[in-house]
């Protein structure tokens, strides 16, 4: 007898309803009765819906009547109080499900129309997150297809809430945790080697410092010592100087000493005490330093952290009060958080300023001649090794530090093996095409910065030789970027303010992250402004001038005013 493919989807709904209202062994009895009643031809079979393995295991668990099934039903997420204020995070009990041998925890995300809720009527939709306890042999696709078909069939509504997207995103937490891989052991070995080098370097540095402090005590005046073998200068009777360089193995000794010296210097570069001291030391700067940039860095970093706390927090912690959060966004002072988009622009500005200013100083020192190939190589070597180590840790160690309902969503396990090479080439803001799907996706900023850096020598050299030509290039690129941004915004119907992005895009507005947020032809204006200011500072480097105190207030409050605009 052919098992109807839709039985499993109906069973999930029945399980959901029963788990809300029935306890203990009654759950099993009622659920089995309802399951039997629905085994008839509910809908036409669809062979691509749920795999036979999943259905077979589901039937086996059901008819065996084990206590584990009762626990599985109990661990399902259930609607709670506060639905009308946005309490739609129904995670269930992750640990209870994970402890069951034949089941695994899956988190489903469904998009729901919230227009009927007065406090949320301006939002196009919000997600329902539903935790389910599925049989081990059921894949993400099995659970996805079952729920999707179920919602389609039932046109499910609750108190006026309507599903606007029946497609459910599913992420199942695998059991047991992924076993230690070769990559994990390799990553741990690399980290251990670096740790040993840090310890050895620190020991060598301590010994070197103590030796340097002891030498002055042991030193004496050379005139106080009578040589045992006097030479001609010291009044010797025609004797020759004793020179160890004439010994047969002196050449090898010099080579060995040189190798040991290089090795010691290499180990000292890893010394923790040395590097920590350099990082923590605030030394006096030279006359040509730009101290105010440190303030811009600090304030911008605080701004970035504040904005990301809300941007990522809303999507990961499982809000139970969407209405309250939406109310915050309507307050005037909350614009500082909603406009944190521009905090990244301040770093682009700083990058453009420093690249232009420092390169112009070097061009002046070298009479306009710079080995441009080293200009690029130095930059690549500075950034890439650190990023590769970060990718390695993210790929092979972070999966073992995540355990919970959203472990699979946050780990990005399948992304780095596929797309790590895009990071090495600094094209992760173009490939993969979808925003947030790149390996360590936050490095879109580095991709943009590297792309700006690649074209910067053309502008910098023009500013050095023919400033008016450089200004024209900066102005032309900026106008082109603004024009492209305007056309894309109008074509895809994006809102004019980034504040609207934070509270939900209108339907049909497109993908803001893919088209606007991470693209270099949109983000380059602050970098160009930084290059322009860098050239102005270069021309004023030899002039002493003071800024009136009240102008400091203007400069301080301008960013605050911009964040509230």
Image (cartoon, helix red, strand yellow):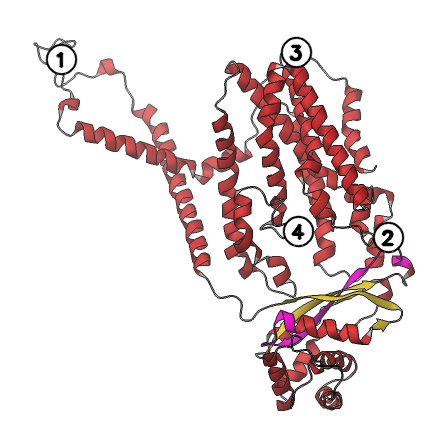
- As measured in the structure, the alpha-carbon distance from the residue carrying label 3 to the one carrying label 4 is 49 Å
Residue 179, how many percent across, how many down?
Answer: 48, 66
Asked if marks 3 and 2 touch (Cβ < 8 Å), the reply is no
Please tell me which residue is depicted at 53% across the width and 42% down the height of the picture.
Answer: 425
N-term mark: 3 or 1: 1
Determine which residue is flagged by label 3: 543
Nearer the observer, disc 4 or disc 2? Answer: 4
Q: Which disc, if any, is residue 327?
A: 2
N-term mark: 3 or 4: 4
Determine which residue is flagged by label 1: 231
Query: What is the crowding at mark 2: few (fewer than 14 residues within 10 Å), some, or many (at least 20)?
Result: few
N-term mark: 3 or 2: 2
* First to last magenta residue range: 119-142
Left or right: where 44 falls relative to 413: right
N-term mark: 2 or 1: 1
- As measured in the structure, the alpha-carbon distance from the residue carrying label 2 to the one carrying label 1 is 93 Å
Between 179 and 531, the residue placed more toward the observer is 531
Residue 23, how many percent across, how many down?
Answer: 74, 84
Nearer the observer, disc 2 or disc 1? Answer: 2
For the residue labelled by badge 3, is the local secondary structure a helix, a strand or a loop? Answer: loop
Please tell me which residue is depicted at 83% across the width and 52% down the height of the picture.
Answer: 506
Determine which residue is flagged by label 4: 434
Query: What is the crowding at mark 3: few (fewer than 14 residues within 10 Å), some, or many (at least 20)?
Result: few
Relative to 120, is 431 above or below?
A: above
């Amino acid at each position: 007898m052919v098992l109807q493919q839709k039985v499993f989807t109906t069973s999930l709904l029945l399980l959901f309803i029963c788990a809300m209202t029935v306890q203990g062994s009654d759950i099993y009895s009622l659920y089995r009765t309802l399951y039997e009643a629905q085994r008839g031809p509910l809908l036409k079979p669809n062979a691509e819906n749920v795999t036979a393995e999943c259905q077979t295991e589901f039937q086996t668990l059901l008819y065996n009547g084990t206590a584990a099934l009762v626990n599985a039903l109990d661990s399902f997420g259930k609607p709670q109080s506060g639905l009308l204020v946005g309490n739609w995070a129904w995670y269930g009990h992750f640990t209870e499900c994970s402890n069951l041998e034949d089941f695994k925890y899956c988190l489903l995300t469904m998009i729901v129309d919230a227009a009927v809720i007065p406090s949320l009527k301006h939002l196009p939709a919000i997600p329902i997150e539903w935790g389910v306890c599925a049989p081990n042999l059921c894949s993400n696709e099995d659970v996805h297809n079952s729920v999707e078909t179920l919602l389609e069939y039932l046109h499910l509504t609750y108190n006026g809430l309507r599903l606007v997207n029946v497609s459910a995103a599913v992420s199942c937490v695998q059991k047991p945790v992924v076993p230690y891989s070769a990559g994990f052991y390799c990553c741990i070995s690399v980290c251990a080697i670096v740790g040993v080098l840090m310890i050895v370097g620190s020991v060598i540095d301590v010994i070197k410092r103590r030796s340097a402090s002891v030498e002055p005590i042991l030193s004496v005046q050379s005139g106080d010592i009578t040589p045992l073998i006097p030479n001609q200068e010291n009044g010797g009777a025609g004797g020759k100087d004793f020179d160890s360089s004439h010994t047969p193995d002196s050449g090898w000794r010099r080579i060995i000493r040189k190798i040991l010296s290089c090795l010691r210097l290499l180990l000292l570069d890893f010394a923790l005490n040395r590097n920590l001291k350099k990082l923590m030391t605030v030394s006096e700067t030279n006359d040509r330093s730009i101290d105010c940039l440190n303030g811009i860095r600090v304030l911008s970093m605080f701004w970035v952290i504040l904005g990301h706390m809300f941007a990522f927090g809303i999507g990961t912690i499982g809000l139970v009060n969407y209405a309250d959060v939406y109310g915050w966004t309507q307050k005037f002072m909350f614009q500082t958080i909603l406009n944190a988009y521009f905090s990244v622009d301040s770093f682009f500005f700083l990058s453009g300023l420093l690249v232009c200013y420092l390169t112009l100083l070097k061009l002046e020192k070298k009479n306009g001649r710079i080995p441009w190939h080293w200009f690029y190589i130095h930059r690549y070597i500075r950034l890439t090794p650190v990023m590769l180590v970060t990718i390695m840790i993210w790929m092979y160690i972070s999966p073992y530090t995540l355990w919970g309902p959203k472990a699979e969503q946050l780990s990005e396990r399948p992304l780095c093996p596929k797309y790590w090479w895009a990071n090495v080439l600094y094209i992760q803001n173009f490939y993969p095409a979808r925003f947030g799907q790149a390996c360590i996706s936050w490095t879109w900023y580095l991709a943009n910065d590297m792309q700006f850096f690649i074209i910067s020598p053309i502008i910098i050299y023009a500013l050095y030789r023919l400033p008016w030509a450089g200004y024209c290039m900066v102005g032309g690129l900026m106008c082109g970027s603004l024009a492209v941004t305007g056309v894309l915004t109008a074509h895809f119907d994006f809102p004019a303010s980034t504040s609207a992005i934070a509270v939900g895009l209108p339907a049909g507005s497109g993908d803001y992250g893919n088209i606007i947020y991470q693209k270099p032809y949109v983000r380059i204006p602050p970098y160009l402004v930084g290059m322009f200011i860098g050239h102005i500072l270069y021309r004023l480097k030899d002039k002493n001038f003071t800024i009136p105190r009240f102008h400091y207030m203007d400069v301080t409050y301008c960013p605050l005013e911009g964040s509230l605009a």
